[in-house]
Amino acid sequence: MKKRYRTYFSKTTISIIFTIILGFLIGVFSTNTLPKTIYEIDDTQKSYVQIFLNAFSLNYWYFFVLWFLGMLPFGFCLAYFITFFKSFMIGVTFGLCLKSSAMFGILHFVTFAILEMGFLIPLLIYLASKSVSFSIFGRKSLQQNGQNYFNILVFITIAIVIYAILTCFKMNFLEVQ
């Protein structure tokens, strides 16, 4: 049993998951000192192109920089920081939703962040573990597997485009309700 568990999750992946959980919890607890106010979502009409571009560009740069840091010798330090910061921001969003409308805030958070939690967090774990591994093992590993590492960027780009399209559909669905 223990051997099978180690086959699926490397030490790098476990440390990335721990960093994400820690960032999320610190983000939630950092909102405790804020005064209770009601945060409302702006209902201005946005075009689907604008929603797509916002969803794509806000997430792509995190992932591109994370991928690029895998090619640097000490990039794993910044890769952990970016992973922590992304999960910290998700935790702050969750904390603000809880602060503004208590238990109903969880429902608001789930409706607006379901794609991010189900789509971007697994991508973040995957890319961060690859980036940290390539950064630690150095240039020799990158020269041998350079094309494979570039394919990771192509895969992440396609996945974020799909995420942005799904975000447009989600906004359309939330608009109907």
Image (cartoon, rainbow, N blue to C red):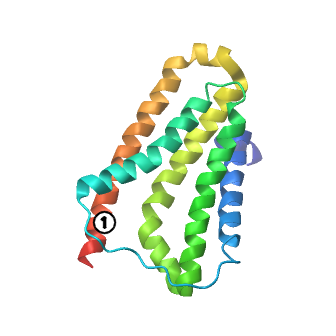
Q: Where does the image place residue 12, in percent across and percent down from the top left?
A: 71, 40
Q: In terms of image quadrants, where is residue 131?
A: top right
145 w.r.t. 125: above or below: above
Secondary structure, mark 1, is: helix
In what quadrant of the picture does the C terminus appear? bottom left
Q: Residue at x 71, y 59 (%)?
A: 22
* Label 1 crowd bin: few (<14), some (14–19), many (20+), radius 10 Å: some
24 w.r.t. 157: above or below: below
Q: Where does the image place residue 54, in percent across and percent down from the top left?
A: 37, 53
Furthest-right residue in this view: 2
Q: Residue at x 32, y 64 (%)?
A: 170
Is any atom of residue 10 visible in this view? no
Is any atom of residue 109 visible in this view? yes
Q: Where does the image place residue 32, in percent across and percent down from the top left?
A: 69, 77
Whether residue 144 sits left or right of residue 45 in the image: it is right
Q: Which residue is mark 1?
A: 171
Whether residue 37 sits left or right of residue 137 in the image: it is left
Q: Where does the image place residue 50, in percent across and percent down from the top left?
A: 28, 54
Whether residue 99 sits left or right of residue 151 in the image: it is right
- Count the numbered circles shown: 1
Front residue of 116/82: it is: 82
Q: Residue at x 52, y 78 (%)?
A: 106
117 w.r.t. 53: above or below: below
Q: Residue at x 31, y 72 (%)?
A: 174
Kind of residue indicated by mark 1:
Met
